Structure formats: structure tokens, C-alpha cells
Image (spheres, rainbow, N blue to C red):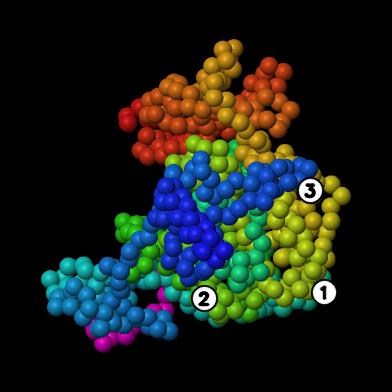
Amino acid sequence: MEQLLKMVLCLSLFVLTAFFYENNLFHKVNFGALKVYKYDTLISRNDSVYIIDTPGCKIPNYEAFDLSIREKILPGRFTNCDKTRSFLKISSNCLEIDHADVQKSQFKNSFSFCRVHRIYRPRQGQHHNFFRYIPIKGRLMTGDQLCLESDMARVKCFDRKNRTIFTELYWIYQRNDSYEELCDKRLRKRMDDPKITENLNVLLLGVDSTSRLNSQRYFLKTRQILEREFNSFEFKGHNIVGMTTFQNVVPVLTGKSIYELKEDGKFGNTTMDNFQFIWKDFEENGYRTLFAEDAAHMATFDYFKPGFQNYPAQFYNRPWSVAWWYAGSPRCMGGRSEPEAVMEYLTKFVDVYKSKPYFAFVFLSSLTHDRQELSAEMDEVMSKFFTKAYESNAFNNTMVFFFSDHGFRIGRTRWSNIGMYEVLSPMLFITVPKWFSDKYKKIDKNLRNNANKLTTVYDIHETLRDILNFNGRVEEHSSILRGESLFSDVSKTRNCTDVGVPESLCSCSHYINVKNFSTLYATRNLSTDIVSKLNDLLKNHQSVCERISLDKTISVYQEVSGRKHTYRISIRTLPGKALFEASVSSINDKYHVGQILRINKYGDQSKCLNDYFLRNYCYCKDT
């Protein structure tokens, strides 16, 4: 019997090994991470057909490594920044040249000196890309120490022939006593209100283009820490309300869509200073405020928009980030990537203020916006941050919203049913202090229940409002609202229409592939309806944009859960071989084309147009 069991075990191991080899999985999983974190399985097993199963919404329980897309998933990639390792060390905001590191470098026989410049931008009334370098000291030599008073600085080091051999940008936490006094004064006034019972910190930490499923593929370490070390809730039915970062971030911070914020939804000539972002309310209540992004050229409020002329928050890194961009947007500087540098600052910030109220918004794009496989590097950055926060107990009084704006909109998996779903279903974790869950058991129960319902960014905003005005009571609603605080028990019957999600972006809708769509197209070519709408969108730019024509219909999917005929159609157009996806609905023989999504890179094809929305569609005549 024992011999038989050994044979069965050996055969099972052989079959399992053959399975992973045949499916090319060995190089697609970070086995170093698996070993450290002791994952029991590589691929989760689903116990139910639907991940969200409510009267108002049913979302299929897709596998992150489903057979239909497994070969299209790229192995994780990492940037090696060791070659740009810093010559400098900093302690208590004082810089000095690390002689030992110089001796280890290729410049040990040629290193001469460094120069230090302040990165300066006035806090008010300046162009969003403005900054200038102001010299701080003539030369910094080996053995010298320079204590910085500014929070942003550039250090350039030279060899004996006066050639630049090293550049590093610093963003350093500097305490501002007058600001601290103002915050304390405002906080005392807040605490005089008997209705306010808690002062929870808020950290909104966003990563671009990361679906819930993609976080399962690449964010192995981060998910492990959030699930095992923190009191975290993963919201499995979180749905986008628009296709861009801007469209999904604005509702978080204002509770409004971009069209409610500004009727035409166009912000190309509108600065952001006069809009009522929620961090202003928190600051009025004695909270320290921080706003930070990387990738200055495509930042949320700056991509084909004029951003902020005044500092939107007390701690604001845009001048530093623009300096990084003007330096050529190097992947590494000073032995670290730009996201790493931002997260180093945030690590210091959350530790300094773990016992004082703060509101921090951080959004990172440079690693994950265009390269899905670089999510593995972002996982290293985030897991390091969360590990340090856990070890220092930095989140004992903090609610953390670890989120994404939308899923990956281009790439190899995009053409599958799962790929279409992923775009609509961004990652969202909410981490709550354990004492808070113990003290407010009804809120804890509601968070757990809401994690398995349809949610959107409007709910996040209402939750932030609840934190700002927290009184320990849970408000229940007699009718369905577009946005409901996740502290309350949101309705099970809510659907995409109820929560402000366009039908074309609804993950509750189920589609099947119409493999032979020639019969459907015999009476009406729905693809030409999409092309007609594209040309209509560009009608005021015919002098610079080519007229678009249909090249090919790539796929047609039909919705099977709705009361009207709705199709999700992918096409290729000329010139430029642009790829688009759109929903086309038919009611009483009238056809309506929904939002048209660009699902491949447009590069320089639309460089003649300065409209961040229409750039998705235009093919410039001079291309």
C-alpha cells in the first residue's frame, strides 16, 4: 500500500510539472516571492460562477491565469538602478559625499566635486510646469556637509575634466512650524464640535492601469501584506465611471463627474485651483495635506491641462517631478526610480504624522501606464512601503485606499472577454485600523458586505465625507443613491445605471462572441456607425485631422443579460490602423453608439491636436 501511494504521488508531481511546463508558467511567476511568502497555489480556484452575485449586478468570477489568456501574460520585469547608485548620503536633511561609495564606483580616480541647487517654484501664481534652479553652495567636496533648508534640491557631481558624472534629485521632508501651529489651531476648533468622535488619517494611494486580476498576477507581495498583516478589504465589484485617469479621479476628490465639474467636460484652458477638492475641507479641519505624483508629463491634472497655478496642498512635489521630467525622465536617478523616490518621501511623511491628522493623495503612473509587466517592479516598491508602515505601526490611525483608476487598456490580453472585463474593474483595497473595526462593528460588517457588491469612485468620495464628519453613526438610505458611504450597507439591488456607470463601461453586462456576424451585418453594418461617430467627433478639426474610414471589423460581442440589443464591437480604421472599441445599442430600430475607446497606442499620430480627449481619435494630416 505504501509503495502504491509513493507511485501515485510521483505520478501526480510529474503531471503537475508537465502542466506548468506545457503552459509556459515557470517564468511567469515570481518564485522568489512565492518562496518568501509561502503561497500555497499559483492559481486560485473559484468556488462560484460569479464574483459579484446580487439582484442588481452579476459579475463572472474570471481567473487571473485563465487558459484563454495565459500565454499572453508577460513575465514580470524589473529595472536595475544599481548602475546609478548615489555618491551621497543624507542624514537629518544634511548632505555629504559618501567617500566609500565614490571609491567603489567607476569614478574613484576621476571624481572631483558636486554642486547643489534648490528646486524652486513660488507657492502661488505660477505656470504648472514652472521651476528654476537656485545655487545653494559653490562646491561640495568630499568631507563637506551641507544642511538643506528647502525641501527640493538637485545635486550634480563632476569629474576632474568638469564633466557631469552623476545627477540626483531630492525631495526631503521639512517641518514648517507656522503651518504646524495653524493645523493644531484648526484641529482644536474641530474637536470643540461634540459631533466629531474620531480623527482618522486618510491615505489615497493610486497605481495607474491596474485591474483587480492584474494585481493577482503581479502584486504578489503587496497583496500578501495587505491581506495578512493589515485589516484590509478587497472590493471585488469596483467599476470605473470613465476611461481616463482624470474621469475616475475627479469623482473621488469632488463627488462629481467631469461634466458636473464643468459642463463641456473640457479642461484644456481651465486651471484646477478654484474647484472644491475634498482635501481643502480636510485642511480646514486641521489635517496636513499632501499631493504627489510621478510622470509629470502625464500627471492627472496636467496632461493637456494647465494643472494648478497655486500649490493645492502644503506638501506638493510637482516642481521636483517636472525637474525629473526635464532631466529626460530617466528610469533611474541616484539608484532609484521616480516612484521609489516618491514612496521614500511618503514613508517618512506617514511616520512623522502617524499621530497627527493628515490627508494624502499619491498617484503613480510611470511604471504601469504602458507596461503591464512592470507591475512586478511596482509590487516591490509598494510591498516595501507597506512593510515599513507595518513595522513602524504608521497606520494605527489611518484609513488607506489602495486603488487604481482603470484596468490596462491596451496589450495582448485586451482582445479577450477577460481583457474587456479587466479594463472596467480596477483594483481597490481599503485598509482600516483593527481598533476601529473592533470599536465600530457595524461599519466593519458593512465594509465586508460591500466588498462583494457593485461599487464606484462615488462611493469612495462619500466614505471620505464620512471620515471628515465622523460621528460613529451609520446612515442608512431608503433609496438608492449614486454614491453611498461604504460605512453604510449599500443597496444589493443597485445596478450600473443607479451608480453613474455608462452601459458601455458596466462590468455587470455579459457578452458572448458573435463569431459569424455577417448575418447581423447583412441588414446594417454597425461598424460604419462607429466610424460615422468618429468623424462627427472630429468635424471641427477637419483642417488638421484626416477623415477616418473602416478597414476591418475585428470582433463583435452581443450582450445577453439586457432587455435591449447591445453589441460591443472592435474595429480597425484607416489611416493609421487605429483600433477602437464601442458599444452599439438598438431600441425600436434606433441605434446609439456609446463611448468609443482607443485600445492601441496613438503615439505621434495625433500630435497636431491639443485636445486630450480627441487625441484618441485624430490622425494628423501631416503624419
Point out the image quarter for the N terminus.
bottom right
Question: From which residue to which does the magenta span run?
Answer: 140-152
In front here: 305 or 26? 26
Mark 1 to mark 2 CA distance (whole Å): 35 Å
Q: Which residue is mark 3?
A: 492
Judged from the image, the secondary structure of the residue bearing numbered disc 3 is loop
Q: Which residue occupies the extreme right position in the image?
A: 478
Residue 194 circle label: 1
The kind of secondary structure the magenta stretch mainly shows is loop
In front here: 344 or 543? 344
Q: Where in the figure is residue 522, as x and y percent of width and height?
A: 56, 12
Q: Residue at x 57, y 25 (%)?
A: 514
- The disc labelled 3 sits on which kind of residue? Lys
User: Which numbered disc, 3 or 2, marks the residue that appears first in the sequence?
Assistant: 2
The answer, for residue 549, to whether it is visible in the render is: yes
- The disc labelled 2 sits on which kind of residue? Lys
Count numbered badges in the picture: 3
Question: In the figure, residue 280 lies in which quadrant?
Answer: bottom right
Question: In the figure, residue 502 lies in which quadrant?
Answer: top right
Horizontal side, residue 64 vs residue 476: left or right: left
Q: Residues within 10 Å of mark 3 (few under 14, many from 20)?
A: some
- The disc labelled 1 sits on which kind of residue? Pro
Q: Which residue is mark 2?
A: 388
User: Which numbered disc, 1 or 3, marks the residue that appears first in the sequence?
Assistant: 1
